Image (tube, rainbow, N blue to C red):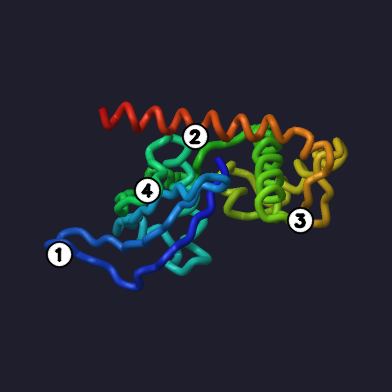
Amino acid sequence: MGCHCRFIWNGHFTSPLRERIFFVLHADIRLENSDGLHAPVAVNLSATVHEIMPSLEAKDAEGPVINSLRKEVDRRQLEFVKSGKLVPVHFSSRHYDFKRSKWVFGKASDEDMALLLMRKVYWQTRLAGGKVWIADPTEALFVETSPEHLIEIAKKLELQGLIQRDGEWAMAGNELMKQSARFEVDMRTALEELEKKHAYERG
């Protein structure tokens, strides 16, 4: 599902009972191509994660936080609603590989990366138009690769007429837009499965 995430850094931390320190980040994850559905969340960064991070500046924190939230969406842990209260999300070190000193969110195959880029270019073209950044370091981190490798994947898509590439940017090609029915069905199916899960949990 195509999502847009907006962050609000609180600029302070709370220390309940002075026992544990949490750095709080508010985010609003909006589901694109929906009737205003969104998931407001309060991300709690534990003291352990704070020690791992070079800093809490956006340049160091946004990538891991965004990808942790993407994992929560993929696992259908977040419910998208038209209104709602902030849902606490614990940003822990479970996605951090201490042996390799790196964030790990799951290694993707080249086929999965190609599909990721196709969906990204399609939906951004469909909803906003213009060029799409295909060498996003945050996305590269999510699939455990490099921005350079994403560009190599994009070159193969370009040869198939699916995209028109300009360095680190791309636009949807005719062959990609011809697959609109596929992407629309995938979107509706994913949203229906998410709604069924949360309806079941509510009883």
**Numbered disc 1: secondary structure:** helix
Disc 3 residue type (three-letter): Trp
Residue under numbered circle 1: 18
Q: Mark 4 = which residue?
A: 93
State the residue at coordinates (71%, 50%): 125
Please tell me which of labels 2 and 4 falls first in the chain: 4
Tell me if residue 59 comes above or below residue 145 in the rendering: below
**Which quadrant of the rendered structure holds the C terminus?**
top left
At x 15% / y 64%, what residue is drawn?
Answer: 18
Which residue bears the numbered disc 3? 169
**Label 1 packing within 10 angstroms: few (<14), some (14-19), many (20+):** few
Q: Amino acid at mark 1?
A: Arg
The alpha-carbon separation of the residues under discs 3 and 2 comes to 28 Å
Residue type at tag 2:
Leu
| Residue at the spot 37% in from the left edge and 60% down from the top edge | 26
Residue type marked 4: Ser
Task: Name the N-terminal-most of marks 4 and 1.
Answer: 1
Q: x and y percent of residue 197 in the render?
A: 38, 29
Q: Which residue is mark 2?
A: 191
Q: Are marks 1 and 2 in contact (CB under 8 Å)?
A: no
User: Of circles 4 and 3, which is in front?
Assistant: 3
Between the residue at mark 1 and the residue at mark 2, the CA separation in whole angstroms equals 41 Å
* Residue found at the far left of this picture: 17
Q: Residue furthest bottom?
A: 11
**Of marks 2 and 4, the one in the foreground:** 2
Give the Cα distance between marks 4 and 3: 32 Å
On the picture, is 194 further left or further right than 24?
right
